[in-house]
Amino acid sequence: MDPWLTVVGIGEDGWDGLGAAARRAVREAPAVMGGARHLALLPEIPGQARETWPSPFADGYDRVMARRGSPLCVLASGDPMFFGLGASLARRLPAAEMRVFPAPSCVSLAAARLGWALHETATLPLHGRPLAALHPLLHDGARLLLLAENRDTPARVAALLTARGFGGSAVTVLEHLGGLRERRFEGRAAGWPHPPGADLAVIAVTCAADGGTAGGLSRLAGLPDDAFDHDGQITKRDQRAVTLARLAPRPGELVWDVGAGCGSIGIEWMRTHPACRAIAVEPRADRRDHIARNREALGVPGLVIVPGEAPAALEGLEPPDAVFIGGGVTADGVFDACWTALKPGGRLVANAVTLEGEAMLTALQARLGGALTRLSVAHAAPLGGFHGWRPAMPVTLLALRKPSTETEEAPTP
């Protein structure tokens, strides 16, 4: 099918800022669809039908798809393929059915105004996204470009930075970039002095950790135990680092954290990469509350919490790329349900601290192979007037990889 859909990016400079090819595409289109603000930037074109993009926003995609095969031009802000509706339409259509004429994105314009290198800057849209998603990006010296959700977003970002120990961060708000109304205002996060401004803005942050703070948490596995809200039911730091190394998270993959406790495994899995996903299965309501608080505080608000006991609670869940069984490995049907649901080539790690759990892992290793490891950790502690080693309970860990085919043998992870 020939291209029937044309997506034109338009900036605050409107019609005058469009290139010749983009202008021609708009002029020749029998129908144009876009936000009221965008449509108002176009000149009158005799005979051209115009339709305002609907609310809720997602309904507009169905209207576009209903016209499939009939020529249509859609207007979008800046670069439609950069967190824009062009990217959303491209997920619904083959590339051969659409043409895209991008304008400079607001992020590109902000970087140009600030003299920042885009490839050295983290970018995060905050539209319809919890501010907690910002937490993993915070470290001393980081440069961030944030797309505001509305006029209140700069003050909310400043409050979050202050609460997380980055009150000295420099914050610059850039509004209406590329247009006649372009303006900027600046300040420190702590005591943010400005009233709400425009709804459309880019918030530039140069992170500065307050004196005496660590300047953010590492994204590597093995956060301190006290980084989590928990009741003692937590995979301890050293064992957690080894467990996550065996789970081997990769971008875009999903892990099941079965018997999640405070959610530490799923949370650290997701912190390794923004595209990583996790489902935490936990029967106790008080521990699910711990998980909810931890996913917010540690910047992974997308972690899904499933109430209930495994294996029943696992029914209907999206098949995982990896599974961690931290609690309940001896319960009837839990391992078998996890192993059956695991995708071919996926990894499963199960930990046990009891003799019964260790016996089961030993039997599973004899049947399925994999690597069986016993972790013993001791920490120095006062002993009278001296110091001695205080051992933690040893943990037995079984790491398996599911064969990719029925004939493949499972290799040692």
Image (cartoon, helix red, strand yellow):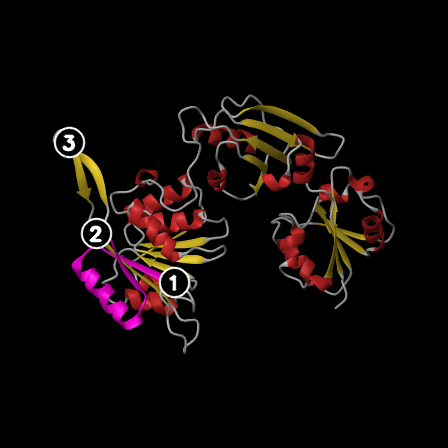
Which numbered disc flags the more N-terminal residue, 2 or 3? 3
Assign the C terminus to one quadrant of the image.
bottom left
Q: Nearer the viewer, mark 2 or mark 1?
A: 2
Work out how far the residue at label 2 is from the one at label 1, CA to CA, in angstroms. Answer: 22 Å
Q: Judge the density around disc 3: few (<14), some (14-19), many (≥20) Cα neighbours within 10 Å.
A: few
Please state which of residues 321 and 131 is positioned toward the viewer in this rendering.
321
Residue 358 on the magenta span: yes
Asked if residue 402 lies left or right of residue 1, the reply is left
x and y, in percent, of residue 376 in the image: 23, 50
Report whether 240 appears left or right of 93: left
Q: Which mark is residue 347?
A: 1
Number of the label disc, if any, that sits on residue 394: 2
In the image, 312: left or right of 151?
Answer: left
Q: Which residue is mark 3?
A: 386
Q: Earlier in the sequence, mark 2 or mark 1?
A: 1
> Residue 35: percent from the left, percent from the top?
70, 45
Q: Residue furthest bottom?
A: 407
- In this view of the protein, can residue 148 be seen by the observer? no
Q: What amino acid is labelled 1 in the image?
A: Arg
Mark closer to the observer (3, 1): 3
For the point 65% across and 51% down, the residue is: 85
Is 359 situated above or below 58?
below
Residue 128 pos. (x, y %): 54, 44
